[in-house]
Amino acid sequence: MIKRIQDAIPKKRTIILRLDLNIPFSNGKSADISRIKKVKNTVLFLVKNLNKVIILSHFGRPDGKVNKDLSLINLMGYLQKVLNLKIKFLPSLEIEMHKKKIDSAPFPSVFLLENVRFSKLEESNDPTFSRKLASLGDIYCNDAFSVSHRAHASTQGITKYLPSFAGFLIQDELKALSMALEHPAKPVAALIGGSKISTKIDILNNLSDKIDYLIIGGAMANTFLKAQGYEIGVSLIEPKMIKNAEKIISSLKSKKCELVLPFDIVCAHALDDIADRRTFSVNNCPKARMILDVGPLTCKKIINVIDKSKTFIWNGPMGAFEIRPFDQGTNIIAKYVAKRTIEKKLISIAGGGDTVSALKVSGSVPKFSYVSTAGGAFLEWLEGKSLPGVESLKL
């Protein structure tokens, strides 16, 4: 069980709050500020209780060097607009200098410290840097689940020097993940898509012990089809992973987990040759074409599995969703999962960068039980790994 920030009953204290403000950003603008919106409740809770709040975050990959393009001052406008608060920017990592300013500020006040990754000591989890960060406050609150798989100074090291608690977003994430695998309503189905088995092998092995149906989509499915002797034309494949696919198929049979692979496939001679697309049986993939999406029969099979399931986990698209109409399979399944969720017949949990992007296209994100923006942390949780930033918040 984790320690929750509301259990600390913080009033007129100085709170160090780790957030993930690493949002997509180019040409001075961001097309997605959902990560800022998701931490609003935690920030406003702390301010309402008259605390001083010092926000820590990273932004991009500065590799321990100061980079004005990756300065958090670029996000101040978005942060202040979403929170509807005045925020004071601390324009460096000179901790001792900022401490005087923080100490003399009134309650409540909100500060944003410069990008913690401007110091190479952040990612090395340097204890001296951790202690310096801790010296800014009385209490530490982590609400950055998306970086809690990293043992960094601002996510794990700092917890050794301050009473540490989880913010509301981390609490929501852990509750959703518990519903998905630790205490799920059964039967459980998981849709795992994407391009490579090699990046999802640990997920597949971990899930196989916990679920009843495993649906494989995206280019990953090509390697599984090849392992079963199907022709896949010039489709993307991982030849070195064919034996791994064979082992997974065999393992699933012994664990009584049903594997669902494409029945029919949408193919074209090239990804951008939209007019050339055709649907074939999985038995008849032309040698000169590539598989770019699943067909209607496969969608019907997956819908049948969804109807049998009480919990649905989703990571990765069904096809080359970035280019229409190769997003049709993903959209059909997303809309049906959303429909069953709204009808309260299904608990649906989704996560991963491409997954969230794909679900947004179908308009399904707000209709799922929970959609995680955590990326790497969500994937490592699916792999069954412990997350250092979360472990350090446990009682």
Image: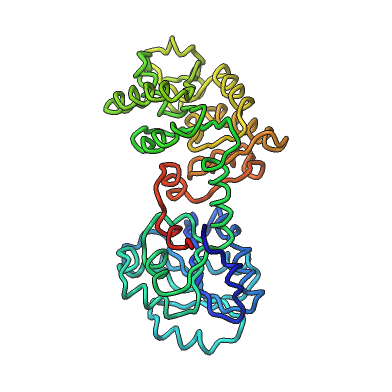
Extreme top residue here?
Answer: 284
Q: Nearer the viewer, residue 190 or 178?
A: 178
Asked whether, in this view, residue 29 is left or right of residue 376, the answer is right
Residue 110 location (% of width, % of height) = 57, 76
Compare residues 79 and 345 and report the one nearer the observer: 345
Residue at horizontal 55%, vertical 27%? 329
Which residue is rendered at x = 59% and y = 57% of the image? 38
Left or right: 60 in relation to 344:
left
In this rendering, the answer to whether 349 lies above or below 118 is above
Residue, far right? 343
| Residue visible at 61% across and 24% down in the picture | 303
Seen from the viewer's position, the closer of residues 106 and 87 is: 106
| Quarter where residue 253 is shown | top left
From the top left corner, tell me how far across and down residue 36 is, in percent.
57, 60
Q: In which quarter of the image is residue 287?
A: top left
> Is residue 122 depicted above or below 349 in this figure?
below
Q: Where does the image place residue 275, in percent across and percent down from the top left?
A: 52, 21
Q: How many marks?
A: 0
Q: Which residue is drawn at 59% across and 75% down?
A: 10
Question: Of all residues shown, which one is farthest toward the left?
Answer: 240
> What's the colour scheme?
rainbow
Q: Which of 304 and 365 is in front in this view?
A: 304
x, y percentage for residue 45? 64, 69
